[in-house]
Amino acid sequence: MGLKRGHRARPLEWIAEKMIFLVSLSAIATTLLIFVFITRESLPILFGQMDSSHKTLVIPVADMNKYSDKELSKYLDMPEADFKAMDAETRQLMIEVKAEATAERPTDKDAGINTASLRYLLMPHQWTGYDKPSYIWQPVSEIHKYNIIPLMVGSLKTTLVAMLFAVPLALGAAIYVSQLASNNAREWIKPIIEMLSGIPSVVMGFFALLVMATVLQDVFGYASRLNALVAGIALGFAIIPVVFTIAEDALTSVPRAFSQAALALGASRWKATWQIVLPAALPGVLAAVILGFGRAIGETMIVLMASGNASIMSFSPTDSTRTITATIAAELAETVFGSHHYRLLFMIGLLLFIVSFFSNLAGELIVHRLKKKLEGRA
Amino acid sequence: MNFATNKHDYESSIFSGLTAAAAWLIVAILAVILANITWYGLPGLSWNFIAGSTEKDMFNPDHASVMPMIFGTAALVILMTVMVVPVGVITAIYLTEYAQSSSPMTRFIRGAVNNLAGVPAIVFGLFGLGFFISFVGGGIDELFYGATAEPVWGKPAIIWAALTLATLTLPVVIVATEESLKAIPPGLREASLALGATKLETVIKIVLPQALPGILTGSILAVSRGAGEVAPILFTGAAYYMAHLPEKLTDQFMELGYHVFILSTQSPNIEQTRPILYATVLVLLLLTFALNVVAIAIRMRIRKKLRSLH
């Protein structure tokens, strides 16, 4: 190879290596781009720059020329560039339409409220016609009500049902497969449970909607056919493989010597598992639960199809429920690009991204540390 | 700690039994789901249903065909694969062949890959709309067509849906390829280097051919995942109905998973459309499951071969 080293010796090698390195940054770049572009669309809401109140100001067509393009585009709620691109006739038409719309604006006391400000997103408000302050998400009503609390409650409620259903089953199965089952049973059960993750979520949603909803309603006899319980159980099926795989992996990575020592001291297989192996693998089990939570709260199609999608503020699992993910999926296509509704949906998307980011991070860190610890001891 | 065991250790047998019951219950649930779909879906499958032409009435059980949806799904995942596999494979090559495993950069990349695998599918949909469609597509329109013209690229299209899915399946390809690269005995690389081959030559001529089955597994898993995801394509390109098949990259398309969603939630008469709904679900499931089974089979062969190597 000679004494020359680095890029002067083999320029092609050097270039190739740099290119490979650059491409490998794609995962980091994608993560950053996701964060940047979702934040970008939701910033005007977070900074309180969006105004959803119904204006009382009317600009007559005759006075159009007294205002600058900037003021007029703001008046029409459109980007300045779009406004500039229109010819004079279209502009005049837009101003006339706006004036008509303003004349027909709702006249009750709520019309002047900027419902896209943080106070109305998070705090209850006594709207006209309600007898007490309430949390309401009604983005397409005349007064746009954008309170995101009902959606958060819906997401958490459905996820809780899913966890209560999936975690005991998945952990039980993981303990059985990794510690108690015969080799033969293990060879069969493990791939079959992992196959569950190959079922597309839209198929799980379909099954919940058509089959499970009917069966569960017959059994429990509640009023609303689609609700958080149906969606939660179907969601539970979907996260069982996630929780199972990680927990099983953690349990298996506990050195054999641990359980063998207990068995040699006369413990039963169950006692060795329960008192020795499980405590050693506990962080991994915790990570499995956290990652399962992250997966459940971000799942879309199942809850969109099986939860009923009524955005009511309720803690009951048998009420029709709307989650954050289902709200984005159901409403984004109907929104106007750049409107407050559009930006709000991006904002709750950002919320989801952050929650899943931290649950992932926590899960990965715990698994990483556990592996290191167990390998160090083994 | 007290390990004293009674003659009959009821506690142990009860709890062992419960864990076994949990495992078998999961297997039973899966069996019920698959059996239900097969039972009601199979009668609806016919040659006309799978390969018929684009009919006007997709809710009519006598005429409906999923051919356009199968075509759309295939076109979508082929585009996706073409984009995601090279990037994923090169990333995996960097991580296993070039990077020092403990360097902060490597850990950072790995962290990003793991994180990407956990980002909710609907967030990818938002990303596709905000980045690919309005930023990239809108940017292209502004550059070449002028801002006022009807959008050509800055609207939902198959290319944007495929790109969105490519970002979603990137971790799948990286992880599968990395696994197969790691399984190649280091002796092979060392022998190649000792004979005077450069690092790049070793990677291209020795490592990659050995990793081919692993790359194939990763691609198949990515395709299976991509074909089943609906949330990311909701606003990036899937169409409720189209009279013709997609012809250009900027066309929208019909898709199997999205069609399942439409048939289940927007059917004018659910009782009447139930047979086509079940049949469509069965087609989707056969497609994704068959791909999964193939991937698992290849993977098992790789592992067997490796065990004999070591």
Image (spheres, rainbow, N blue to C red):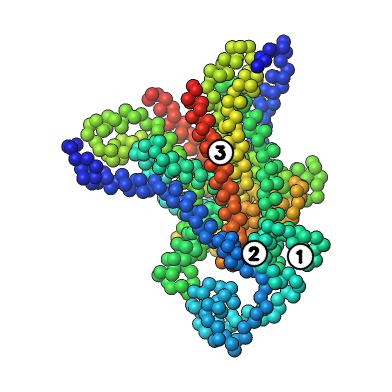
Q: Residue, x 60% and y 59% (percent of image)?
A: A345
Residue B161 vs residue B282: left or right? left
Q: Chain of mark 2?
A: A
**Callout 1 environment at 10 Å: few (<14), some (14 to 19), or many (20+)?**
some
**Residue type at numbered disc 2:** Ala
Q: Which residue, as the protein is rendered here, is positioned at the far bottom?
A: A62
Residue B83 vs residue B265: left or right? left
Which quadrant: the N terminus of chain A? Answer: top left
Task: Estimate the x, y position of residue A116 in percent, counting from the top left.
Answer: 64, 64
Q: Report helix, strand or loop for mark 1.
A: loop
Asked if marks 3 and 2 touch (Cβ < 8 Å), the reply is no
The residue tagged 2 is: A116
Give the mark, 3 or 1, whose residue is nearer the N terminus.
1
Q: Chain of mark 1?
A: A
**Residue type at numbered disc 3:** Gly
Residue B253 higher or lower than A184, as above or below = below
Q: Which label number is shown at residue A359?
A: none
The residue tagged 1 is: A127
